Image: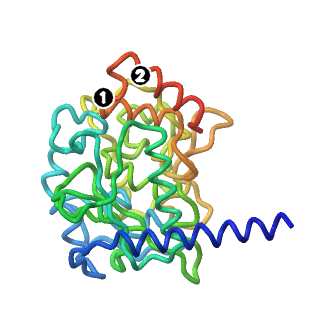
Amino acid sequence: MFSLIKFQVHIVVLLVLLILLIESRVIFPNVPEIIDRESLLPDDFMIEDMVELENQDPEVLPNLYQGDIALNNEIFNQLRVGLRWDTFPKKRWENRTIPYAISPLYEPEDMITIMTAIRTLTRMTCLKFPKWNGKDKDFLLIWPIKYPKGCWSFVGKVGGPQILSLQPPDQTGPNCLGGEGRAIHEILHAVGIFHEQSRNDRDRFVKVVWDNIIPAYKGNFEKQSLENTTYSFEYDYKSIMHYGQSYFAKEKGKLTLVPKMKGEKLGQRKSLSQTDCLKVNELYGCLDNIKTAKKYYTLCRILGI
């Protein structure tokens, strides 16, 4: 009986989603299925040294900066500043608002996964994610790009239709949409958050096993400069923005990152940690007002992992 009710609820959700998609249909800008990977990397990124990646996480497969970050020269040279976006306020989304559009190429269940990730961010932060109205110049365009396929995003607002790629499930596995976690990870990049292990002080908390890293990808483990690392929050092993323990490993099962504190596990792709939640709220001024700060501190504590 319970299984039947659960099935009926799932069907109703799918029907409602399809109706919403039909009623709110917008004209999408022309987006190529294939994008030149070189246009998503800074000039001094050594593409010729790349090797084919196998048995790697879908955040690693795109072969971009640190695996899943698309960076043009301006961002690479000026904006590798972790959370210190006070220096470059134009890279934050105005009015804490990030319009978005989801490609109609996704299956209904994958759209639900993406929308669940967006609802989670809306619930835990003061950011607003309205559906793109077809008029706003700057908006997040969530699209299953075929090349480079995988999970990837720009960091911060870059202007115009800003692509965020989430590879849907296929015969090889769930890829970027086995749950809402990877969608949250990439959206947080678009919000303006870098990887946790790129903090300047990371060597106090994790050991990089350089010998286990594919040589061409050792640059993906570089740190932010001292002045560009925020110390408002402690290093977060549980961050949804932290590399896993075997990212860019030479062989399956080899560790590339090892926590220096016993019992700690590196990263997760379930939801925002308490610290992730606070970082976003601080970045967008949600903690500046005493009243709203209390609200979001409470939400982060209760809902954060």
**Are circles 1 and 2 on residues that touch, CB within 8 Å?**
no
Q: Tell me the CA gap for discs 1 and 2.
A: 9 Å
Return the x and y of residue 96 as percentages of the image width and height.
28, 40
> Residue drawn 57% across and 39% down?
259
Return the mark for residue 39. Answer: none
The residue tagged 1 is 285
The kind of residue on which mark 1 rests is: Gly
220 left or right of 162 in image = right
> Residue drawn 36% across and 41% down?
127
Return the x and y of residue 80 as percentages of the image width and height.
24, 44
Specify the quadrant of the image occupied by residue 280. Answer: top left
The residue tagged 2 is 293
> Residue drawn 35% across and 50% down?
129
Of the numbered discs 1 and 2, the one sitting upstream in the chain is 1
Specify the quadrant of the image occupied by residue 67. Answer: bottom left
The kind of residue on which mark 2 rests is: Ala
Q: Secondary structure at mark 1?
A: loop
Dot 2, how many residues are within 10 Å of its Cα: few (below 14), some (14-19), or many (20+)?
A: some
Specify the quadrant of the image occupied by residue 12. Answer: bottom right
Q: Secondary structure at mark 2?
A: helix
